[in-house]
Image: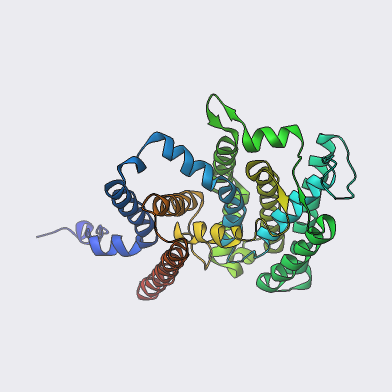
Amino acid sequence: MTSPELDAAPRRPAFNLGRIFRDQLRNIAPFATLLILVGFFTLAAPSFATLGNLENILQQVSVTAIIAVGLTFVILTAEIDLSVGSIANATAIVLTFFTAQPDYVNIANIPVPGGVAIVLALLACGALGLLTAFGVTKIGIPSFIMTLAMMQIGAGISAVLVRGQIAYTVPKLVLTLGSKSLFGVPWIIIFAAALLALAHFVLSYTRFGRYVYMVGGNREAAEYSGVNVRFIIGAVMTISAVCSGMAGMLGVAYFGSAQQNEFDTFLLDAIAAVVVGGTSLFGGRGGIGNTIVGLFVLGVLNNGLDYVKIDSFLKILIRGIILLVALVINVYAERLRATREVGS
């Protein structure tokens, strides 16, 4: 016979490997993809798996990583920012507009001290972010439409300031962070790693980070809990713009020039890094750890395809297929979660 106390005691749920797999599908799939890619390219090209090439991969994804930090905040709130590449362009060109250029650069710019130029560039991207935040939170424009408009505004600022020319000179601090090294490690890798670590700390250990997850997970419940939802959304939009601006400034030094449309391709790269890594497009799930895995997947893929000498046009197609698969997994994982919650 069993006592009533034992009968009433809650039972631990049985170990269910299938349920664990379904619950963690969004995290397992990108990591498994990374391992498969590393294994394939190591077998196809033994010189791929070297410390020197690892540094190449890290350096190649650094600019994308800085943009992806801001996008992670935005996507966690179930919003989107399509203006990141355009704001990176605009900020880079604002920086060079206020930096003395060589005589052969035909830009009627306004040279100021390097520190002032950096501050003005940061103020520019911050102002663009605040404008986006105002449109989304105060006027009520959907973030997709608002950031689409900001994409055009950023492109317009770039066009007006640079007028089809190419600028080369940036302040010394930006040049150091974008193209120099510290004990053999490129500064741009150190900067990107530090920003990723800071963002992870904010999202994981601060009240603001908890609110970001709450807004993305259940906006209505967050409002009932006293969270200022509009402030959180406005803040992440501004964070995204500032991260894009910093990526644009360092990217000028890394690529060696600032020109119109230079960062346009980074929009898809940054979104792909966040989504491929497993952060939910529906908000509330994921984070910087997922973004880091996504960055490695994209970096290994791009770098490895160069090693096996696949046609550049085919490389674009392969990247698109991997992004599509990641989106399918993202949506499928969300449906599994919703089905489980309804059943429980």
Q: Quadrant of residue 101?
A: top right
Closer to the camera in the image, 214 or 323: 323
In this rendering, does residue 227 appear at all? no
Q: Position of residue 90 (x, y in %)?
A: 76, 55
Q: Work out which residue is located at the far front of the displayed protein and give it.
A: 104
Residue at the (56%, 45%) spot, across then down:
62
In this rendering, does residue 329 appear at all? yes
The answer to whether residue 153 is left or right of residue 198 is right
Q: Quadrant of residue 76?
A: bottom right
Closer to the camera in the image, 284 or 180: 180
From the image, which quarter does the N terminus lie in? bottom left
Q: Position of residue 21 (x, y in %)?
A: 29, 61
Q: Work out which residue is located at the far top of the displayed protein and give it.
A: 183
The answer to whether residue 115 is left or right of residue 328 is right
The answer to whether residue 139 is left or right of residue 328 is right
Q: Is residue 119 above or below residue 185?
A: below
Residue at the (60%, 70%) spot, across then down:
220
Q: Is residue 49 above or below residue 277?
A: above
From the image, which quarter does the C terminus lie in? bottom left
Q: Give the mark count.
A: 0
Closer to the camera in the image, 344 or 324: 324
Q: Position of residue 241 (x, y in %)?
A: 70, 55
Color theme of the render: rainbow
Q: Position of residue 157 (x, y in %)?
A: 81, 60
Q: Is residue 132 above or below residue 141?
A: above
Q: Is residue 21 above or below residue 114?
A: below
